[in-house]
Amino acid sequence: MDEQRRRRYLEAMGIQVWEPRAGAQPGRKVTASETPRPAAEAPDAEAPVASLSWVELRARVAACTRCTLHQTRTQTVFGVGDPNARLMVIGEAPGADEDRAGEPFVGRAGQLLNAMLEAIGLAREQVYIANIVKCRPPGNRDPHADEAAACQPYLQRQIALLAPEVILAVGRVSAHNLLGTEEAVGRLRGRTHRFDPGDIPLIVTYHPAYLLRRPQDKAKAWQDLQAVYRLLHAESPEAG
Ligand code: SF4
């Protein structure tokens, strides 16, 4: 793995990257005045979200109180996956399992999502998974519009840092927030949308939790995943 790629992995994992001081010699004891410093300066609490690195963004989200969801969360659910991923999966909000685990799409819905991804040859670790909001809405209700708006800069920054080739919007709340529409998922799926900024191809599909309740729609979700596959392999999504 090259150095730049390694650093991006570590940053996305929330691991601080340390820089050796110039002129440091292997095996030589480091004195107090030469203590290694972080590559980046301490995160500036006032810095615009759009300027933050992965590490800074994760820290900003972890401390966030921009909406009332912070009052009831166990922890924030930032996102997980490969910071070099070509595919970004965006769901709606953490549920009870995710709130406990601090990771999106765990539990039965997460297992189904993993299986959907594996069906197009992608391991969970090869994509990046995030949500519209980073804190669990109480009782697993949908996030309110003001909560989604408060959290939007974080997701926007994740998308900008990742620069995915394709976005998969999972479920109604995700599709509505990403596309600025209120059309039903059934009408949004089956075609390629464009996400701005970035003009990124975006496919809408059903949420795995919905598919667990309505397994008869899994065939449609499979069609959506095939469209993602074709986009990633530069084939026409209309073909087949
Ligand atoms: Fe902040 Fe988003 Fe959590 Fe609201 S949902 S407190 S905006 S991180």
Image (cartoon, rainbow, N blue to C red):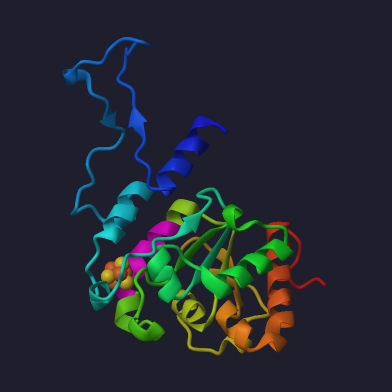
In this orientation, which residue lies closer to the viewer: 21 or 227?
21
Query: What percent of the width, then of the height, locates residue 38?
Result: 28, 34
* Chain part drawn in magenta: 149-158
Tell me which image quadrant ligand 1 sits in: bottom left
User: In the image, is 98 to the left or to the right of 213?
Assistant: left
Question: For residue 23, what is the image quadrant?
Answer: top left
User: In the image, is 144 to the left or to the right of 65?
Assistant: right
Q: Quadrant of the C terminus?
A: bottom right
Query: What percent of the width, then of the height, locates residue 101?
Result: 42, 64
User: In the image, is 166 to the left or to the right of 23?
Assistant: right
Q: Quadrant of the N terminus?
A: top right
> Is 121 a magenta residue?
no
In this orientation, which residue lies closer to the viewer: 144 or 118?
118
Residue at the farthest right position = 240
Whether 14 is drawn above or below 38: the answer is below
Q: Say if residue 144 shows up in the picture.
A: no
